[in-house]
Amino acid sequence: MKIAQVTPLYEAVPPKLYGGTERVVAHLTDALVDLGHDVTLFASADAQTRARLVPVRDQAIRLDPAPLKSDLAAHLSMLGEVLDRVDEFDVVHFHTDMIHLPMFRAYADKTLTTLHGRLDMKDLAGVYARWNEYGLVSISDDQRKPLPLANWKATVHHGMPGDQYIFSPRSQGYLAFLGRISPEKRPDRAIEIATKLGKPLKIAAKVDAADKIYWEETIRPLVEANPLIEFVGEIGDHQKSAFLGGADALLFPIDWPEPFGLVMIEAMACGTPVVAFRCGSTPEIIEDGATGFLVDTMEQAVAAASRVHLLDRDAVRARFDLRFSATAMARRYLDVYGDLLARRPFAGAVLGTEAILDDVVTPLRPLAEDRSFAALA
């Protein structure tokens, strides 16, 4: 199958530091290549990929030192390049939210759009009602709730390459918070949990410009006043195994409808259980009492963090391998691609008989392992 992956340009693919969507695109692209497909990635030139790269910007936007930049211009230029080459692909898979919708209407039947963000914002419903011919993929069932009438084709949970994360059979006695310093991520809750338990907490997090005041006025004073708390700062993939693997548990004390939460499965890949507030996608990702604990109150969170040592870290990693590997994610997407192609008119003329057998029938064949994935999700 000839597949185009179209990524946002804000971070490198994969990101050098913090970044979710571009990281998922990187792992999906490589997994599709490993499964034998012809994949083209539209991304910035600093992408690292096993696919054919079409560089559409010299580097990702966020770490570009240029003082004046236009993210809209960068993305429009990329979409123009994709449009010029759209006939080369059987499937064009967009990860760019909605910006491509007006441009690709004539090709909507060969596109798939994965929505990676929250969907409870004003005006979104009107966009997806107006351009409802585009098939959409959610990254959790919970993510769909604000847009129940959108043209949903599937839910595909994220996956990560297992060999990128080193399993740690034993922790080093601290709790971990990894992600972004922002009110909805609730690092203040993580600090309170650790303080009540008298346990060290390491915070590895990005501070966006939009959250600078929250960091300076709310979180930084809590960190500096508490000897149990260590602020590590923003870390890259090469540091995550040590950081997450050394933790007794990852604290995921969110207070918003998290669409997925990559850090949860990154922790699981290291064998580290997760203590997560029951919010957004967390009940779909965490198996309560197996890969971590789901909680509703601070009292429950403190109690859960005190008993994470009872969970089997080998079993936590095994559940990651079964449910959240990059290969599992790619196979689920291949099912969706195959269904898309099967519904297109004149698919035989587009693909040829041999291609149909290879690229449509095979992904749609119900593999036993994929049925187990669906049952667990």
Image (spheres, rainbow, N blue to C red):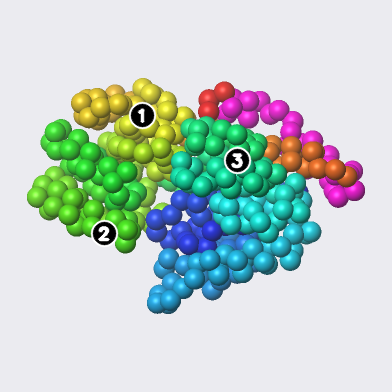
Question: Three-letter amino acid code at disc 1?
Answer: Arg
Spatial CA distance of label 2 from label 1 is 27 Å
User: Was residue 370 drawn as part of the magenta stretch in this picture?
Assistant: yes
As drawn, the label of residue 212 is 2
Question: Three-letter amino acid code at disc 2?
Answer: Lys
Label 3: state its secondary structure: strand
Residue at 90% x, 48% y: name it: 349
Residue at 20% x, 35% y: name it: 193
Where residue 306 sits, quadrant-wise, is: top left
CB-based contact (under 8 Å), mark 2 and mark 1: no
Decide if residue 134 is on the left or right side of residue 181: right
Q: Earlier in the sequence, mark 2 or mark 1?
A: 2
Q: Which residues are magenta?
A: 347-374
Decide if residue 41 is on the left or right side of residue 85: left
Q: Which residue is mark 3?
A: 137
Q: Position of residue 376 (x, y in %)?
A: 53, 25
Q: Which residue is mark 1?
A: 278
CB-based contact (under 8 Å), mark 1 and mark 3: no
The prevailing secondary structure element of the residues shown in magenta is: helix
Give the camera-side residue of 197 and 129: 129
Question: Three-letter amino acid code at disc 3?
Answer: Val
Label 2: state its secondary structure: helix
Number of dots carrying numbers: 3
Instruction: Note whether residue 31 is visible.
Output: no
Q: Position of residue 284 (x, y in %)?
A: 46, 29
Q: Earlier in the sequence, mark 1 or mark 3?
A: 3
User: Was residue 69 drawn as part of the magenta stretch in this picture?
Assistant: no
Instruction: Note whether residue 261 is visible.
Output: yes
Where residue 75 sits, quadrant-wise, is: bottom right
Q: Crowdedness of circle 3 by 10 Å Cα count: few (<14), some, many (20+)? A: many
Give the camera-side residue of 359 and 298: 298
Residue at 47% x, 45% y: name it: 122
